[in-house]
Image (cartoon, helix red, strand yellow):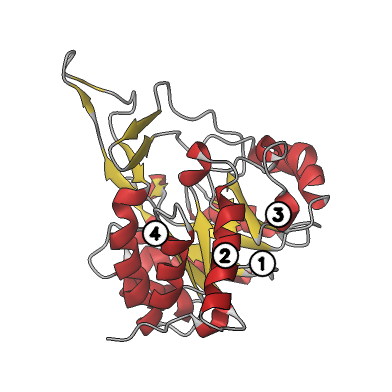
Amino acid sequence: MQNPVMAASGTFGYGREYAGLIDLDKLGAIVVKGISLKPVTGNKNPRIMEVCGGMLNAIGLQNPGFEEFTRGYLPFLKKCGTRVIVNIWGHDLDEYVEVAGRFDGVGGVHGLELNISCPNIKTGGIAFGVDPKMTAKVVAKVRKNTKLPLIVKLSPNVTRPADFAKIAEANGADAVSLINSFPAMAIDIETRRPVLANVVGGLSGPAIHPIAVKMVWEVFKAVKIPVVGIGGIVSAKEAIEFMIAGASVVEVGTANFTDPTVMLKIISGIEDYLARHRMKSVRELVGSLMV
């Protein structure tokens, strides 16, 4: 990657949606919206809203499926001068494994991000990422079915995320990314009904940033593989915080909705910080927290 700033999955579409607003070639990577084996229509509207300190969303992992993505979206991404990482998910273990295998060898795809916050429909809806045994199994099975670099996106809804990071590392993950959004909800006090049609959505944005920094720091101390920091980055300051805590690279999500050019500003801000502190590389920042 030419720099450590990536577009987070689910907030940047498939790149083409932002092409007229930002120079995609200047990004470190684009992590595309989550892809499953078959198309998914997602949840009913309303499914997104602004809240104090961030955003709630209950999109429902809407996506065109593997075939349409590779036919209708990937050709555009191949023309971009940046890395393309595909976020993948499945309704069950078999789907995770098949989707990963389908992308193996597909030109223009430089890595996979495994979203393990999805519920396993074969085990009563328990998310893969909150059960140690299921985390180990899905990472190991996917690892065997792809040669692509594999980033495991951890769930924040566990007591000790570092334990799950170690499980991912032990079963073949090349890196881990964290955090995903937190389950949350909002109520219309006039109607006394949930604002989101799905009732519950995922909270992202500045409100979760300090929590994410803590979790990244804990995970960095526990594993030897690279850590990707996600959560509430709105400027270079938050990105640099993540790096000092241990993140090698970062993903920017919710901020893209308020300022489509924010990632370019963050890249520039990191460069300015390195120059001011006479650092030659962001590697000098990673894990430099002094306690």
Q: Which residue is mark 1?
A: 146
* In front of the other: 115 or 121: 115
Q: Earlier in the sequence, mark 2 or mark 3?
A: 3
* C-alpha distance separating marks 4 and 1: 24 Å
Q: Are marks 4 and 2 in contact (CB under 8 Å)?
A: no
Q: Mark 4 or 3 closer to N-term?
A: 3
Q: Residue furthest top?
A: 191
- From the top left corner, tell me how far across and down residue 25 is, in percent: 75, 54
Q: Is residue 5 left or right of residue 201?
A: right
* Cβ atoms under marks 2 and 1 closer than 8 Å: yes
Q: Residue at x 62, y 44 (%)?
A: 37
Q: Hey, what amino acid is under mark 4?
A: Ile
Secondary structure, mark 1, is loop
Q: Which residue is mark 4?
A: 179
Whether 244 is drawn above or below 263: the answer is below
Q: Position of residue 136 (x, y in %)?
A: 42, 70
Q: Is residue 16 visible?
A: yes
Mark 2 element type:
helix
Query: Which tag, 1 or 3, sits closer to the chain's start?
Result: 3
- Give neighbour class at mark 3: few <14, some 14-19, many 20+ (Cα, 10 Å): some
Q: What residue is disc 3 on? A: 102
Identify which residue is drawn at 64% across, 67% down. 3
Q: Measure the C-alpha gap from mark 4 to mark 2.
A: 20 Å
Which callout, 4 or 2, points at the residue further toward the start of the chain?
2
Residue behind mark 2: 142
Amino acid type, mark 1: Thr
Provide residue 276's location: percent of width, then percent of height. 53, 76
Residue at 28%, 61% in the rendered image: 211
Question: Disc 4 or disc 1, which is closer to the eye?
Answer: 4
Amino acid found under the numbered disc labelled 2: Val
